[in-house]
Image: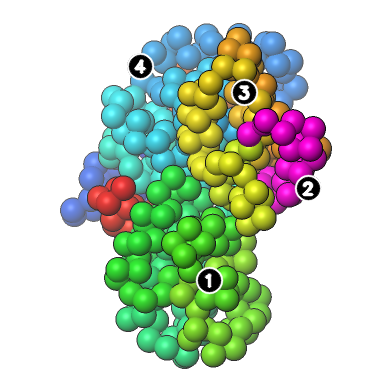
Amino acid sequence: MASVTPVVAGAMRGCPGTKGKPLPGEPFRKTHMQSTTIAFKPFNSLPDGDCQERIRAARARLGRKVVILCHHYQRADIYQHADLTGDSLKLSKLAAQTDADYVVFCGVHFMAEVADIMTAPNQIAILPDLAAGCSMADMANLAKVERCWRELGEVLNAEAEITPVTYINSAADLKAFCGEHGGIVCTSSNAGTIAKWAFAQRPKVLFFPDQHLGRWTGHNMGIPMDEMVVWDPDLELGGLTPELVRKARILLWKGHCSVHQMFQKSHIDSFRAKYPEGLVIAHPECNFEVCAASDHVGSTEHIVRTIKEAPEGTRWLVGTELNLVDRLATEVLPQNKIVQFMATTICMCSTMQRIDPQHLAWTLENLAAGKVVNQIHVPEHEAGLARLALNRMLAIS
């Protein structure tokens, strides 16, 4: 599992007690001599307006030493401070191209892990609130995936017949698992390309943690539904029979996004009845029925680009996180484009909402004082295997 350094700055990868000296063959990681960090408690009661002023002041003191990354789903009062915006992989790639010492990721835990893996050895990845996790990523952990692999090995030769594919929305140790077992990472943008690669390696795919992205990807490849089965990690042999395992081409982990599960086909039916000329676009983390009923299906980057490039005066129903939809609706309104949120209830990434002005102000003021808090640190052995799976993806997409 990736470790977190919440207070002590500059911890070296995998080498506690070496006093900043890297182990043989390891890259040098910047270390900091620091006293006690600034406590968070006083910030917790600060009004948002005061926090915004302190964020700007600390940001100005830090200058180019820090880069602030904000995911599309981030709340508006944090998004306004972004140096770079986009989806999780794009942001990590962009951060690696900067010369910033500190990469402050206003997203969730797995995103900061990817940033730590992909950035330079001297760059330190930071998550302002360690409680900002991902419910989907939590639905597949290493112990359950390893148990799944062992049980599959009792039915067939897993190493020879199955390519493990993990969605980037997963912990670093699952990316490392894929790296170790000849597997790969995918995103919602390149899942189709990655699946083709995976099937070129072996006849079956184990896809985790999001069953919906896996199912939609398989459907677009022409794989019948009865050859895509759901693996329930809480049941023996995933709740399947040996015969179903042998027949399956894709084994779909029983996982989902807590936001995108809220969108239903009935929302699309109501929209089309009221606005027959309207267009529907959904993220592939939505269930199959929603994706099948949509005019366009794609990643957050695809959704933003498609609507921005659409003709003036078009009306859109969008099935993805609320902060992205609200921001996009405001941006395209001058072109007389109407953007509506798909669900009738509020659907936002509640864990990403934990990155609030109080945590960002606290993080930046500590950095400005030479103190690192909430460093996300993936041990080098794990990072190396995860990087292998990520590099396989980057090489073909």
Number of the front mark, 2 or 4: 2
* Residue in the picture at 53% in, 71% down: 224
Q: Amino acid at mark 3?
A: Thr
Q: Quadrant of residue 386?
A: bottom left
Which circle's residue, 3 or 4, is located before the other in the chain? 4
- The residue at which mark 1 appears reads as 224
Number of the front mark, 2 or 3: 3
Which circle's residue, 4 or 1, is located before the other in the chain? 4
Q: Residue 250: horizontal and vertical position, in percent?
A: 48, 71
Cα distance in 3D space between marks 1 and 3: 34 Å
Crowd rating for badge 3 (residues with CA inside 10 Å; few <14, some 14–19, many 20+)? some
- The residue at which mark 3 appears reads as 314
The colour scheme of the drawn protein is: rainbow
Cα distance in 3D space between marks 4 and 1: 52 Å
Q: Give 26 or 8, whichever is nearer the viewer.
A: 26
- The residue at which mark 2 appears reads as 266
Q: Residue 87: horizontal and vertical position, in percent?
A: 48, 36
Which circle's residue, 2 or 3, is located before the other in the chain? 2
Q: Secondary structure at mark 1?
A: loop
Task: State whether residue 381 appears in this view.
Answer: no
Q: Which mark is residue 52?
A: none
Q: Amino acid at mark 4?
A: Arg
**Vertical relation: 234 (above or below) 361:** below
Which circle's residue, 2 or 1, is located before the other in the chain? 1
Q: Which mark is residue 64?
A: 4
Q: Secondary structure at mark 3?
A: loop
* Residue in the picture at 47% in, 65% down: 222
Number of the front mark, 4 or 1: 1
Provide the residue span drawn in magenta. 258-279
Task: State whether residue 84 appears in this view.
Answer: yes
Cα distance in 3D space between marks 2 and 3: 21 Å
